[in-house]
Amino acid sequence: MLRFLALAAIFLSGCASFSPRDASTVPLAQPVNLQRFMGDWYVIAHIPTDLDRGSHAAVETYRLNDDGSIAAVYRNRLGGFDGKSKTMTPTMHVQPDSGNALWGVRFFWWWPFLYEYRIAHLEPDYSAAIIARSGLDFLWIFARKPTMSDRQYQGYVKRIAGWGYDVSKLEKVPHR
């Protein structure tokens, strides 16, 4: 029961209504080509939720559904490469008038709320992205490959700090 309440608190913290017109220090990448965005993204670093703290080998995969929603599969291992395997399968919904950069995430079909997901930065070649939230609480740095140069990573850290994030909370995600 306590675990359910903790999970509910995490989700409720992100389910206030949101719109691309809301003021935020976190930008929206413009425009996002959904077909190019689909596929595998390695989590290079994140400001984790309680559900993915201590992640290893974290990968998020997206697939565009016929109805326009996006099926996601998030896989990781908690605590180490041999740690417990964890998989989450939320459904994403692109928010209107956002240039495809603002999505609502629903973790359970019966869950009445959408969790904010902002594609805040996207490289022109779709090789890396920063996923953020206007609440400056959680963040993910994605790449198409499991590694990223330190120079590129530090550039993203500087960008993220400029949006107001506490970058001391960033944790790199190990990959083999």
Image (spheres, helix red, strand yellow):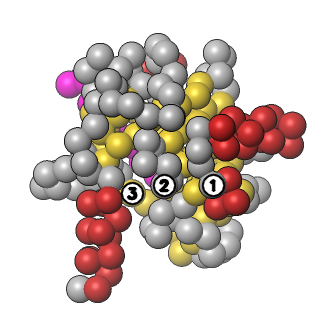
What residue is shown at x 29% (from left), y 86% (from top)?
Answer: 2
Of badges 1 and 3, the one in the foreground is 1
Q: Amino acid at mark 1?
A: Asp
Q: Amino acid at mark 3?
A: Met
Q: Is residue 60 above or below residue 97?
A: below
Which residue is the site of mark 2?
Answer: 137
Q: Is residue 176 above or below residue 99?
A: below
Please tell me whether residue 129 belongs to the stretch shown in magenta. no
Image-based side of 74 in relation to 106, left or right: right
**Residue 88 bears which disc, if any?**
3
Residue 139: x percent and y percent? 54, 48
- Specify which label sits upstream in the sequence, 1 or 3: 3
- 57 or 99, nearer to the observer: 99
Circle 1 sits in a helix, a strand or a loop, which is it? loop
Which residue is the site of mark 1?
Answer: 166
Q: Residues within 10 Å of mark 1 (few under 14, many from 20)?
A: some
Q: CA distance from mark 1 to mark 3?
A: 26 Å
Q: Magenta region: which residues?
A: 66-74
Could you tell me if the residues under marks 2 and 1 are in contact, i.e. CB atoms within 8 Å?
Answer: no
Image-based side of 87 in relation to 42, left or right: left
Confirm whether residue 23 shows in the render. yes
Residue 117: x percent and y percent? 40, 40
